[in-house]
Amino acid sequence: MTATEETLVLVDENDRETGVAPKLRVHEEGLRHRAISVIVVNRRGDMLLQRRRLDKYHSGGLWTNACCSHPRPGETTPDAAARRLREEMGFDCPLQPLFVTTYRAQVGDLIEHELVHVFGGVHEGAVVPDPLEVESYEWIGIGDLNADMAARPERYTVWFRKYMGEFGGGVAALATAARANS
């Protein structure tokens, strides 16, 4: 099954399931659906970013958080977050819920309308990204990331800019906690 053949869980504004639909149709019609995102920092408080593979069906070549995806029908959001982190970035780490947000944005010819459960974790060790998903990755300090996002926002995915703009304090708190526990 290709990424665009997946089935996504449709939800209302309160995250109650309203049905399922094929991924491509969901993004063509801008249907609200459940999603997950994972933000990972190391003990120094640097954030792990991935550059999406250039030929992704949208937002190819842009920098974003460690991983983003969708739970499968019947899969919990924590399980989906752990699964996709392992599949995309090649490692596991304990994850905690950070926040839930909704956004709607045009991404090329498609529309993202997601209710996103964002998780955070701390990882030290190897990162082994899936080359079918990830072009490259890097660790970056929060201050340097914020400065680059302000100077060159077009380098970053629309959802990641939202997370950092609206919930950057939560991300910074995750980084601070990681440093405190090192």
Image (tube, rainbow, N blue to C red):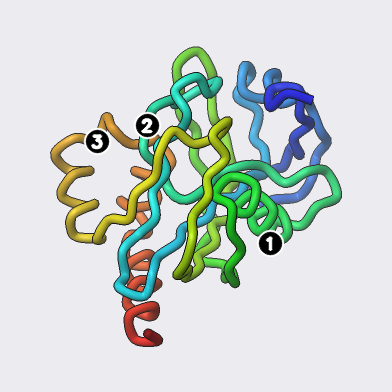
* Residue 28 relative to residue 64: left or right: right
Q: Nearer the viewer, residue 16 or 139?
A: 139
Identity, as a three-letter code, of the amino acid under mark 1: Pro
Residue drawn at (54%, 34%) of the image: 131
Label 3 – label 2 distance at C-alpha: 10 Å
In this rendering, the answer to whether 93 lies above or below 128 is: below
Q: Position of residue 6 (x, y in %)?
A: 76, 29
Label 1 – label 2 distance at C-alpha: 25 Å
- Asked if labels 2 and 1 touch by Cβ distance under 8 angstroms, the answer is no
Among numbered discs 1 and 2, the one appearing first in the sequence: 2
Residue drawn at (19%, 35%) of the image: 152
Closer to viewer: mark 1 or mark 2: 2
Identity, as a three-letter code, of the amino acid under mark 2: Leu
Q: Position of residue 26 (x, y in %)?
A: 68, 24
Identity, as a three-letter code, of the amino acid under mark 3: Pro
Q: Nearer the viewer, residue 47 or 126?
A: 126
Q: Position of residue 49 (x, y in %)?
A: 38, 49
Among numbered discs 3 and 1, the one appearing first in the sequence: 1
In this rendering, the answer to whether 19 lies above or below 40 is: above
Figure quadrant of the C terminus = bottom left
Residue placed under numbered mark 3 in the picture: 153
User: Could you classify mark 1 by the number of other residues whose Cα lies within 10 Å: few (under 14), some (14-19), or many (20 or more)?
Assistant: some
